[in-house]
Image (cartoon, rainbow, N blue to C red):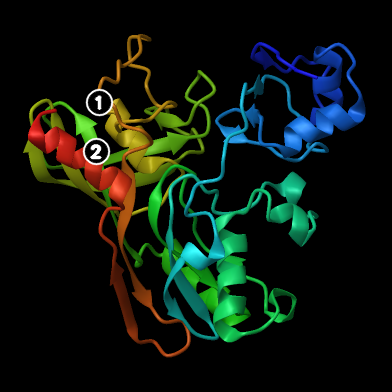
Amino acid sequence: MTLSLAPFTVSPQEAGHTLAKVLRSRLGGPSWNDVRKLIAARRVKIGDAICSDDARRVKEDEVIVLLEHPKPLPRTAHPSRLVIRHLDEHVVVVEKPAGVNTVRHPAELEWSEERRELDPTLEDLTQWAIAKQLSRSSHDLQRLRIVHRLDKETSGLVTFARSVLAERELGLQFHKHTVIRRYLTVVPGVISPRTITTTLIPDRGDGRRGSTNLPDSGGKVATTHITVEERFTGYTLLSCRLETGRTHQIRIHLSEAGHPVCGDKVYVKKRDGTMFDDKSGATRLALHATELGFTHPATTATMHWTMPMPSDMAKFVEKLRAGV
């Protein structure tokens, strides 16, 4: 049975129902088994992310897309391919591939391990890789504790806490902005070195995060230090050091400065309401967490790592460098 459906927005009447129920209704009543199969086959997107949980409760105004063909997992989304840069009883540092969520959606937390294997997060991959390295079952390991995260399409260095002590101490370091975090990114146009400081709010008026000049907005101050790594014809490779670590901070600051990150599909609206036209050919968000450093939560030793751009982003940069 071939199932097809145009993209649609969840209505108020559909909000709160399971993905399977809403899809079945929209598709005209196929069997529950057929609907669950197409969801498990990675043919359904909610927003920009594949959703393989048929029991996921949808929200009003979410956009659901039924793909013509299943979307394969990234080649790097396998524990054997995950690079662990550091591992001890308190912390683990890994290289996150693009295309993988850092953590699981709250609605998916009760998934079995078998189900998680169909759509693993970085948290899953890391735990499985640790289990393999230590020759232990993942069920016997202490759970990973989230202290920061990267967007799905962003690659780079990520750390998880493996103990209560590490979770507390790393949390304090992130809160005090003492953790070293530097990103590489490519933007259109010519941009000069600068420091951008704004107050970010969850909704700037169009449903997206953004900056505000309104007093008493309840927003949070965000500061990004920008330097130029290399200039190409029509594009600039930037290094962005976070002083604060707000959600989507770099993407928002660069977009509001008139230079949205190449490959970004969210922060692409200009101040006059028109859209930026991305002609870069970027195959994904051109953002990479290249440097990470912190004080070890137990030993107080200085810990520091760097990671070069992965091959997909390096090839993109090389094309710009060659003027292709």
Give amino acid for label 1: Ser
- Give above or below for 93 relative to 322: below
Q: Which residue position is annotated with label 1?
A: 280
The N terminus appears in which quarter of the rendering?
Answer: top right
**Numbered tag placed on residue 258 in the rendering:** none
Residue at x-position 37% and y-position 22%: 268
Residue 49 appears at what percent x and percent y? 58, 35
Residue closest to the eye, 69 or 232: 69
Query: Badge 2 local density, few (<14 within 10 Å), some, or many (20+)?
Result: some
| Secondary structure state at the residue bearing disc 2 | helix
Q: Label 1, label 2: how many angstroms apart (C-alpha)?
A: 9 Å
Q: Earlier in the sequence, mark 1 or mark 2?
A: 1
Residue closest to the eye, 218 or 41: 41
Residue at x-position 61% and y-position 69%: 128
Residue 175 appears at what percent x and percent y? 45, 62
Q: Is residue 273 left or right of residue 22?
A: left
Proximity of marks 1 and 2: CB atoms separated by less than 8 Å: yes
Q: Which residue position is annotated with label 2?
A: 316
Give amino acid for label 2: Phe
Residue 23 appears at what percent x and percent y? 80, 21
